[in-house]
Image (spheres, rainbow, N blue to C red):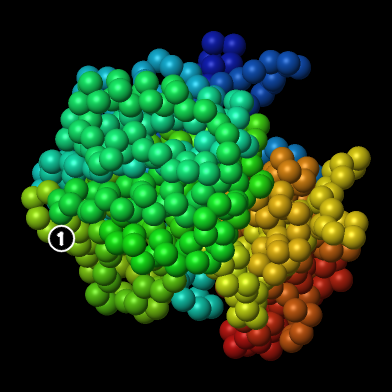
């Protein structure tokens, strides 16, 4: 059986058995639902509930000898719907068995190739569910283990290859005209509060001339940077120089106890100047103390020139030991002098004031990268440097007319660089048609792009948008807590997000330590139960714990797809922790396994509980009344799902039929 996407037009099924082609049978969604229910009742497999509402293709494949493989080819046509100014392509593997979910075994994997015209009207495909890795045609780099996407093109065709992806895959292909940007919206509105929105902007095919840059690289050359770290820092500097274009200018500043510069002012990125700068980097030697305040003062001393984008990359592996040592004073001084400069920071090792490194970047409209001692400094700087080439539009802001955008990340003006799309995550208040407008600055003057989109009042589609927003939100709240020491309001919000979306935080208990692995220790020998420790707790924790907390929060803030979000809160090399087999997600619901019952983390053991027997008439009546329950019910035969003022529990002792009173209770309280 193969569930066909909604609206799909089946063409044919091909399966060769002993030279004979076997045909498939298609049926309507209503008939498919009846068959699904029959199968679910007989096989007691609630995972099949997820596919109710789809069409169903059924074929009998027999016999299959032990060890034999049969290849089934299904062809169907479907219209890719518009999402704002993008085409949306959803692909799913088909049915999974409930036994896999219960035993936490790896689910089946999906691989496919998407091709579309290599035409200026189409932008680069983006996936909010999986990471995309761009490669040259024919190369074969490995991915992070969750999926591998290869984006390439040859001649008139562009190609996106998906390998070993878990779960459903969503792709957006921007549609842009010569003078217009492509703007798309993916919304999720559970109906119990403000909705969730993922907004993307792909610049127009005809792009303005890139904005010239003034790039400053500030390198810590104190004694602690000796050995491999200083070698990698030199290599990172050379890599940064290699990203400069003839219209750019650059400065090199190195500091230990004193502050030194390659030249007193900016140098044009000519071939001769770059070669001279490379020779300067080769002569750097690590010795002395750490004068962070002096280095930042020097980096901020050169005036900003109109029409140029000033960028500072700051790398250190220590705390201030010379000059101003108070991190709050250093941060305040930088804030006063920074102006329009963008500040990107790199913290190497755990001997840092992680809050200072983090806040310098967040307030400077940059990113903070935290590099473990065994990781490559050169790679960390190279990733950021390559992303910052050729700025196309600066100071981009989004406005929504018709709804109100709340708690948006990133919240301030944003820069868009060549080859990049802008991805924003937000909550929204209101519903219906609205106009999204982006305003920004280019070398040709101000630009403005807009499109009309619809924000639904209630929609269970795109549940990944809610989890993406929550992941970024936790990352920003964690940084805010490290800066100000936290408050009851921030603690409550972090706790609520962790509980609701299954995100490991200092207040959640979703991380477990494998047998035989040691948990990190706090002062006095107290073991840490969680990886993430922030705020007041972090001030008492070892430096390594603070470092890992900041590194995790940085990854959370930059997560724009589910693969990155899961990586940000998943396996931690520091603690040996992982997302526990006692936690699972289904749709918008996160479950924790308590006493053999999958329990919605929002369930507070208060209010009315309606107990229903699995696979009974009441069970299927509920999924018909409340389609949102299909995915939560797929976790197993023992589960509790929380509603607004009541909960529904699946249990063998539950009712088999719903009374009129039960139906009224659900309508009034769910």
Q: How many marks?
A: 1
> Which of 566/79 is in front?
566
What residue lies at 48% left-to-right and 43% top-to-bottom? 258
Given the current orientation, which residue lies at the most extreme left position? 444
Report x, y in % for residue 31.
53, 53
Image quarter of residue 389: top left
What residue lies at 13% left-to-right and 57% top-to-bottom? 447
Q: Is residue 180 left or right of residue 128?
A: left
What residue lies at 69% left-to-right and 88% top-to-bottom? 661
Under circle 1, the secondary element is: strand
> Which of 287/108 is in front?
287
Question: In this orientation, does residue 518 appear?
Answer: yes
Location of the N terminus by quadrant is top right
Callout 1: 10 Å neighbours few (<14), some, many (20+)?
some
Compared with 669, 218 (above or below) is: above
Location of the C terminus by quadrant is bottom right
Report x, y in % for residue 343.
39, 52
Compared with 301, 455 (above or below) is: below
Image quarter of residue 609: bottom right
What residue lies at 24% left-to-right and 49% top-to-bottom? 309
Given the current orientation, which residue lies at the most extreme top position? 19
> Which of 113/561 is in front?
561
> Which of 615/84 is in front?
84
Q: Is residue 654 left or right of residue 32?
A: right
Question: In this orientation, does residue 493 appear?
Answer: no
Per the image, the residue denoted by label 1 is 448
Image quarter of residue 508: bottom right
Q: Is residue 261 left or right of residue 233?
A: left
Report x, y in % for residue 72.
54, 25
Report x, y in % for residue 176.
19, 46
Compared with 144, 472 (above or below) is: below
């Amino acid at each position: 059986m193969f569930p066909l996407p909604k609206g799909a037009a089946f063409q044919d099924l091909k399966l060769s058995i002993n030279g004979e082609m076997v045909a498939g049978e298609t049926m309507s969604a209503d008939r498919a639902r009846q068959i699904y229910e029959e199968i679910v009742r007989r096989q007691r497999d609630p995972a099949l509930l997820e596919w109710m509402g789809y069409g169903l293709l059924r074929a009998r494949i027999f016999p299959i000898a032990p060890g034999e493989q049969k290849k089934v080819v299904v062809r169907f046509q479907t219209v890719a719907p518009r999402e704002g100014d993008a085409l949306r392509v959803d692909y799913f593997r088909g049915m999974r068995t409930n036994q896999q979910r219960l035993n936490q075994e790896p689910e089946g994997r999906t691989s496919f190739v998407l091709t579309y015209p290599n035409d200026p009207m189409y932008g680069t495909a983006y996936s909010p569910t999986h990471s995309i890795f761009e490669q040259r045609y024919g190369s074969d780099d490995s991915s992070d283990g969750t999926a591998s996407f290869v984006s390439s093109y040859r001649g008139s065709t562009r190609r996106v290859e998906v390998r070993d992806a878990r779960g459903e895959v969503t792709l957006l292909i921007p549609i842009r005209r010569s003078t217009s940007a492509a703007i798309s919206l993916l919304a999720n509105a559970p109906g119990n509060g403000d909705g969730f929105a993922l907004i993307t902007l792909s610049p127009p095919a005809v792009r303005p001339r890139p904005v010239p840059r003034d790039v400053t690289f500030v390198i810590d050359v104190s004694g602690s940077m000796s050995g491999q770290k200083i070698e990698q820092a030199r290599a990172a500097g050379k890599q940064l120089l290699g990203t400069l274009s003839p219209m750019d200018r650059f400065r090199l500043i190195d500091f230990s106890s004193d502050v030194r510069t390659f030249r007193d002012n900016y140098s044009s990125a000519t071939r001769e100047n770059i070669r001279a700068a490379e020779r300067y980097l080769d002569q750097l030697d690590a010795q002395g103390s750490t004068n962070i305040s002096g280095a930042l003062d020097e980096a901020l001393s050169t005036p900003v020139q109109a029409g140029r984008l000033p960028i500072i990359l700051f790398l250190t592996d220590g705390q201030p030991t010379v000059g101003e040592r108070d991190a709050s004073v250093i941060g305040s001084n930088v804030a006063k002098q920074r102006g329009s400069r963008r500040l990107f920071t790199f913290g190497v090792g755990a001997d840092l004031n992680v809050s200072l490194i983090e806040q310098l970047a967040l307030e400077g409209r940059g990113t903070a990268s935290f590099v473990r001692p065994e990781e490559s400094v050169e790679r960390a700087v190279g990733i950021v440097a390559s992303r910052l080439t050729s700025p196309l539009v600066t100071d981009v802001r989004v406005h929504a007319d018709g709804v109100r955008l709340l708690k948006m990340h990133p919240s301030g003006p944003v820069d868009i660089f060549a080859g990049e799309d802008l991805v924003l995550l937000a909550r929204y208040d209101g519903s219906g048609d609205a106009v999204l407008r982006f305003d920004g600055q280019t070398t040709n003057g101000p630009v403005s792009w807009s499109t009309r989109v619809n924000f639904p009042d209630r929609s269970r589609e795109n549940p990944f948008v809610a989890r993406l927003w929550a992941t970024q939100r936790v990352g920003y709240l964690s940084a805010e807590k490290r800066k100000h020491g936290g408050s009851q309001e921030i603690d409550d919000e972090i706790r609520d997000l962790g509980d609701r979306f299954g995100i490991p935080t200092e207040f959640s208990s979703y991380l477990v330590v494998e047998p035989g692995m040691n948990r990190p220790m706090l002062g006095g020998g107290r073991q840490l139960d969680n990886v993430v420790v922030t705020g007041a707790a972090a001030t008492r924790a070892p430096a390594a714990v603070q470092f890992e907390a900041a590194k995790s929060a940085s990854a959370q803030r930059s997560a724009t797809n589910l693969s990155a979000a899961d990586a940000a809160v998943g396996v931690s090399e520091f603690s040996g922790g992982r997302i526990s087999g006692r936690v699972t997600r289904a749709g918008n619901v996160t479950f924790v396994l308590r006493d053999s019952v999958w329990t919605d983390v929002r369930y507070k053991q208060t209010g009315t509980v309606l107990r229903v027997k699995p696979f009974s008439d009441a069970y299927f009546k509920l999924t018909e009344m409340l389609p949102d329950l299909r995915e939560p019910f797929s976790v197993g035969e023992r589960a509790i799902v929380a509603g607004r003022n009541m909960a529904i529990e699946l249990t063998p002792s539950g009712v088999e039929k719903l009374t009129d009173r039960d139906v009224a209770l659900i309508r009034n309280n769910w």
